[in-house]
Image (tube, helix red, strand yellow):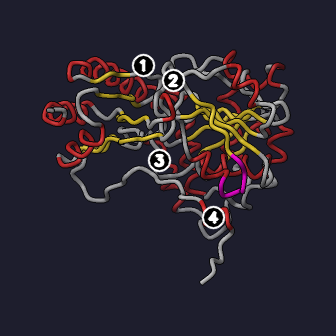
Amino acid sequence: MASVFRPAIDQMAGYVPGEQPQEAGWVKLNTNENPYPPSPRVAEAIRRTAEGRLNVYPDPDATGFRRAAAALHGVDPDWILPANGSDENLTIIMRSFCDAGQQIGYPYPSYVLYESLAQIQGVQVHRLGLGADWLWDPAEAAQLRRQLRIFFVPNPNSPTGTLWSTEQLLQLLPDQGVLVLDQAYADFAESPQTAALLQDSRFDGRLVMTRTFSKSYSLAGIRFGYCIAQPALIHGMRKVKDSYNCDAVAIAAATAALQDQQWMLDNRNRILQTRARLAAALPQLGFHVHRSEANFLWTTHSGVSHRTIYERLKQQRVLVRYMRFPGAAEAGTELDGLRITIGTDSEIDRLLQVLPQSVRP
């Protein structure tokens, strides 16, 4: 029977999210969720919304949220575009700026969803390879940027937590397209780029920042994100979004979370302290730990295969993320390793308790 799907859909593998066990009893350190609950204001906002008018459509522009986000970032509300998770923002960006047959790029290894979104759109993908120091070759970047409509760059990067400087990011601005700065983990960085960068003339008004509530705001279950860009870009992207892309409950929850910055920052600081403790403990078990500015650590081990360590931990009901990146190592071989989300102190204690037997030869 002939396929009824577009050829691009038949040919793609599709993005595979991290494991999400539904039963209790797991130490879950594999999908970079925040281990702490959201602000109590969130539950109250959800309750009020649920008791209100759920029978009517939500505000299609999420006006109240846009005002709150604009105040936080020091811009006007027309610089803000809310979305059903930052992944929807990435989809809107792809559909807004790139036609089938055109080209996007991204640093590799990083967030491979960019490739999946491009494949859905029938767009060609260029990987800008990262070396052993997790930096790209500026000459290769200069050549690549001439061809691209979009360059996606997660900063801090996943899986490593690397934070690239503004000068480095400028090397990636496409000559005739947009640079997308995916800031999913920015709240965990020491000195992340701020919305002030959007007015830096060197970016020529062609910079888009995306943010999520899944990490620092403890709202992965809500699915809410937003992007920040100059109003001319936001105006065009708004044409692409679904009519009511954010539901009333999510809008209320995200607005309440955004308005309780101290709660978010307190949780952030707890995560950073635990990250430092785990980063100090892992080398004693034979791991190499990459310096991270996110809520996870990228680790490799020279004595035991990473898949073996992952499987042994899983047998103990401890989940970390085993990741493999074909063609990312020297001579085009596969790079793999373990990405460990920073959990609560008790969760990290459990990890460190079972790790010694998991790395035995």
Which badge, 4 or 3, comes first in the chain's sequence?
Answer: 4
- Label 2, label 1: how far apart the Cα atoms are: 7 Å
Q: Quadrant of residue 153?
A: top right
Dot 4: within a 10 Å radius of its alpha carbon, few (fewer than 14), some, or many (20 or more) residues?
some
Three-letter code for the amino acid on which mark 4 is drawn? Ile
Determine crowd level at label 1: few under 14, some 14-19, many 20+ residues with C-alpha closer than 10 A. some
Name the residue that disc number 3 marks: 220
Whether tag 1 and tag 4 are in contact, CB under 8 A, the answer is no
Which corner quadrant holds the C terminus? Answer: top left
Mark on residue 162?
2
Label 2 and label 4: CA atoms lie apart by 32 Å
| Highlighted magenta segment, given as a residue range | 119-124
Residue 121 belongs to the span the image colors magenta: yes
Instruction: Tell which circle, 3 or 1, labels the residue nearer the N-terminal end.
Output: 3
Residue type at the position of mark 2? Thr
Q: Position of residue 39 (x, y in %)?
A: 44, 39
Q: Position of residue 209 (x, y in %)?
A: 68, 34
Classify 243 as above or below 314. Answer: below
Q: Which residue is mark 1?
A: 291
Identify which residue, 147 or 154, lies in the foreground: 147
- Of tags 1 and 4, the one toward the viewer is 4
Q: Quadrant of residue 218?
A: top left
- Seen from the viewer's position, the closer of residues 179 and 5 is 5
- Residue at the image position 39 percent from the left and 36 percent from the top: 336
Which circle, 4 or 3, is nearer the viewer? 4
Q: Position of residue 232 (x, y in %)?
A: 86, 39
Question: Which residue is tagged 4?
Answer: 9
Relative side of 104 to 40, left or right: right
